[in-house]
Image (cartoon, rainbow, N blue to C red):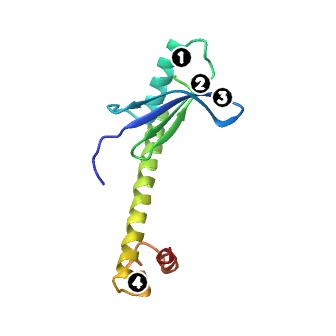
């Protein structure tokens, strides 16, 4: 994996009975944000509410290029314990994204190895430390 900076995209949403997630009324990109996605959501929400006091029911969705997704509807700063929980949640989301990519890369390498002549059974044996034999054979069928 790379140490590329995380780019966050955010959307400000208001409820809309026609749309499950709400209607987007504004959006933006934060390429230089150094805090958490939750903190960014709170910051965006706080600034939006200060500039638009007439709009009350607003939420902010934040997506990070690292796989983080959060939705924030309260601009109040988080207590330290809640902030620690948010940091852990975001770390788990990033880890899940990394694991998903690694799984995709492994499956592709398995298929390439099989195409190069190693039998499906031998490929399944080689990856036995990271996945079960039935899962490996299933991945080779895709």
> How many residues crowd around disc 2 within 10 Å: few (fewer than 14), some, or many (20 or more)?
some
The quarter of the picture where residue 64 lies is top left
The residue that label 3 is drawn on is 15
Please report whichever mark, 3 or 2, sits nearer to the chain's N-terminal start.
Answer: 3
Q: Which residue is at a point 36% across and 86% down the rendered structure image?
A: 118
Residues at badges 1 and 2 in contact (C-beta under 8 Å)?
yes
Per the model, the C-alpha gap separating discs 1 and 4 is: 58 Å
Please report whichever mark, 2 or 4, sits nearer to the chain's N-terminal start.
Answer: 2
Q: Nearer the viewer, mark 1 or mark 4?
A: 1
28 relative position to 3: left or right:
right
83 relative position to 2: left or right:
right
Per the model, the C-alpha gap separating discs 4 and 3 is: 52 Å
Residue 49 got which mark? 1
> How many residues crowd around disc 4 within 10 Å: few (fewer than 14), some, or many (20 or more)?
some
Task: Say if residue 107 shows up in the picture.
Answer: yes
Residue 26: % across, % down: 51, 26
Quick one: 8 or 79, which is closer to the camera? 8
The residue that label 2 is drawn on is 58
């Amino acid at each position: 994996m790379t140490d590329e900076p995380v780019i966050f995209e955010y959307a400000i949403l208001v409820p809309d009975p026609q749309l499950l997630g709400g209607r987007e009324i504004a959006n933006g990109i934060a390429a230089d944000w150094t805090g958490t996605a939750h903190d960014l959501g709170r910051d965006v929400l706080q600034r939006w509410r200060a500039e638009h006091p007439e709009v009350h029911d607003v939420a902010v969705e934040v997506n990070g290029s690292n796989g983080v997704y959060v939705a924030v509807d309260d601009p109040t700063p988080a207590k330290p314990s809640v902030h620690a929980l948010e940091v852990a949640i975001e770390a788990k989301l990033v880890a899940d994204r990394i694991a998903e990519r690694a799984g995709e890369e492994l499956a592709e390498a398995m298929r390439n190895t099989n195409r190069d002549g190693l039998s499906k059974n031998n490929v399944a044996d080689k990856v036995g430390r990271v996945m079960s034999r039935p899962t490996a054979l299933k991945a080779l069928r895709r």
